[in-house]
Image (tube, rainbow, N blue to C red):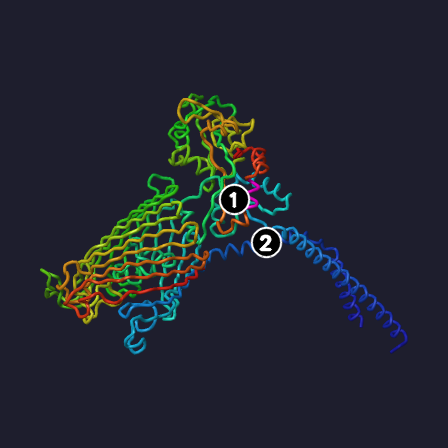
Amino acid sequence: MTKRTLVRLLINKNKIVETRFIASQREKTNKKNNTMKNLRKITLALALTLVAIPFVNAQKIKGSDTVLPLSQREAEAYGKKGGKVSVTGGGSGVGIAALIDGSTDIAQASRKMKFSEKGKMQQSGRQAKEVVIAYDALAVVVNSGNKVSQLTREQLEGIFTGKITNWKQVGGDDMKIVVYSRETSSGTYEFFKEHVLKNKNYMSSVLSMPATGAIIQSVKQTKGAIGYVGLAYINKEVKALKVSFDGRNFVAPSVATAKNKTYPIVRPLLYYYEVKNAKKVKPYIDFVLSAEGQSIVDKVGYISLR
Amino acid sequence: MRNTKLLLVGALSFIAITANAQMEEPVKDTITILQEGIDGNSAKIKTLEKFKVSGYIQAQAEVGQVKAGAKTGANSGSYNESIDGKDAESFTRYGIRRGRIKFQYTEKIAKGVFQLDITDKGIGIKDAYIQIDEPLLKVFTLKAGIFDRCFGDEISYSSSLRESPERSLIFQKLFPDEKDLGGQLTIAAPKNTMFEGLRLDAGLFSGNGIRTDDNGKLDFIGHLKYDKALSNMAFGLGASLYSGTTNNADSNYYTVKDGVWTREAVDKNQTNKRQYIGFDGQFTIETPMGLTNIRGEYLFGEQPSTSGDFGSPKANTYVASSAFSYKRNFSGGHIYFLQDIYMTPLTLVLKYTYLDPNTDLKGDEIKNKADVAMTSFGIGGLWRINSSLRLMGFYEINSNEKTTGVSGYNEDLKDNLFTLRLQYKF
């Protein structure tokens, strides 16, 4: 081996060592990056766990979207007193199904439990207790440009079952009636059918909306529209009709007319819980029924029990 | 050497570029990574949701008087003098009455179902069928394979829900195993129409239970039902028809005339009429005491049967030694009364059931054990411990028609039976 070759080899060796060093440093940096990524994941997981911990032993409420805003406000106020409650919607039917399979402590509902649901509850070895926490008036709303301002129950039945199809048949303009309803899983749908339509079926072409907000939006945008919503959802963008069940006295929906029982479309808002769970849920339900809890009912726009 | 150097430099450059690329690779947002994970899992869960496994196990102890027929244990659940003691007044049997596991896979409009019965006696098939649900009107359903016969109410009422240990005497005899091989169409009136609650099940079945068909002839079974649920009560009314035939492997056919069995020469392997008519009703009401349920069924008809047994075919009907050559006009039925005990998971159960396998013969006219009428009054309790676990205690006081024509039947047989059953359902 010549001297020149030896020098070259030494230089190359140094380059290799240097390159290995750089690669090693980069590997370290990558590892550090990965470690950082993992650390972030762990931190996030820990944070999520920490957020979730208070709800591990929290009471779970599930069900009616109508009752949802009320339960959320009640849970928030109850939380300030040290209580732990988590609230989710999904519809009355969903909440009751969850109570039957034991995946919720309280089912919130805007309709009574069906007979078939009671049977399922019995088969699963559970007994449900019902508590009325507030009342809600259902308002019949039309587009603000509609000149009709009042309807009888019979007229409402005719409109929602498809026998009355034009506004001129009830004193309005010559305009096709566009009927909006809630989805069949909704407690509001069931209550309106039972109470106003006297269990007759909705017309087959009824437009089913997934939420109350969607009905308000559709009625606002459609001239010939009619729908029904909870009292708390009424706003200036739609017109709430006066309703008569006796054909003589037409009453506008309001907290006052619902409380003095002159407005005829009023329904209870309910909590259902398992009898065995009474001890666990009682403090929260007592809070909802208390003066403080009922004042929240008023604030949300529903009708308090007091 | 030059080549080696070039290779080395190339390799090092590649390592450096790769390392650099790794360093510069944007770190994926953690939420995105989690979202991707969730999306992947959701797709897997959707696939898994198509496949369902369910079932139940019934472990039980039975204590019977010496003439009782237990449903578990060896020797067909009968008292055995050499095992149970010569002068014993009762005997005990333990066993798994039912061990059901059901597999179901649903893909779009069709599903395939298998159900097995796994007990200490072995493994048996209970269901194997295809079901197609018409997707547009959601009114029609088609079933083909082995499944429940669509007659009356008690057959389709699952044993995991039933409040007494066994189905009524008449159903045990007329529809052994409850299942049959065939095809069935169901027409259920759509919801939110004036016909809601109305349903017709009608099908053609082989008539041999869960056994291979032996003659290609099919029996018709139909059940028309109306159910209605109100806010605190529900009721249902139904009518059923079984219209079919059973092969007679004998060259004689026996009928009862003026209280006596009479023989008539016939062609071998002629098919004889097999016809049942049934009515069923159910009523449930909610009271402050809990749910009250009353339900009952009444059946009557004509049954071609063997000399020693009123029951329907469970095997090949072309065996001359066990020919279905005896025509029996029969009637039978049952009634349940169930009462929940106020705000508890307990239910009181009362049940009355009767079977007169031959309505043309009474008392001492009866010379054959298979013609003796039987009644059973049962009292029991249910404890639904939780959604999976259930405990049942049930005592049956069994009585029989008395006749001097059959040995031992001049008095009531000592055949009362107590069943204690623990059930786990999943």
Provide the residue designation for mark 2.
Answer: B38
Q: Quadrant for residue A292, please give it.
A: top right
Image quadrant containing the N terminus of chain A: bottom right
Quote the CA–CA distance across marks 2 and 1: 21 Å
Badge 2 marks a residue whose secondary structure is helix
Labelled pair 2, 1 in contact (Cβ < 8 Å): no
Q: Check disc 1 and report its element: helix, strand or loop.
A: strand
Seen at 61% across and 50% down, the residue is A55
Where residue B122 sits: x, y (%)?
Answer: 37, 71
Q: Main secondary structure of the magenta part?
A: helix
How crowded pointer 1 is (Cα within 10 Å; few <14, some 14-19, many 20+) is rated as: some
At x 47%, y 23%, the residue is A149
Q: Nearer the viewer, residue B94 or B359?
A: B94
Chain letter of disc 2 in the image = B
The magenta segment is A282-288
The residue mark sitting in front, 2 or 1, is 1
User: Is A65 on the left or on the right of B186, as rendered?
Assistant: right
Q: Which residue is mark 1?
A: A90
Q: Is residue B100 among the parts visible in the rendering?
A: no
On the image, which quarter does residue B220 sit in? bottom left
Q: Quadrant of residue B74?
A: bottom left
Number of on-image labels: 2
The amino acid at mark 1 is Gly
Label 1: chain?
A
Residue B360 counted in the magenta span: no
- Image coords of residue B177 (percent x, y): 31, 63
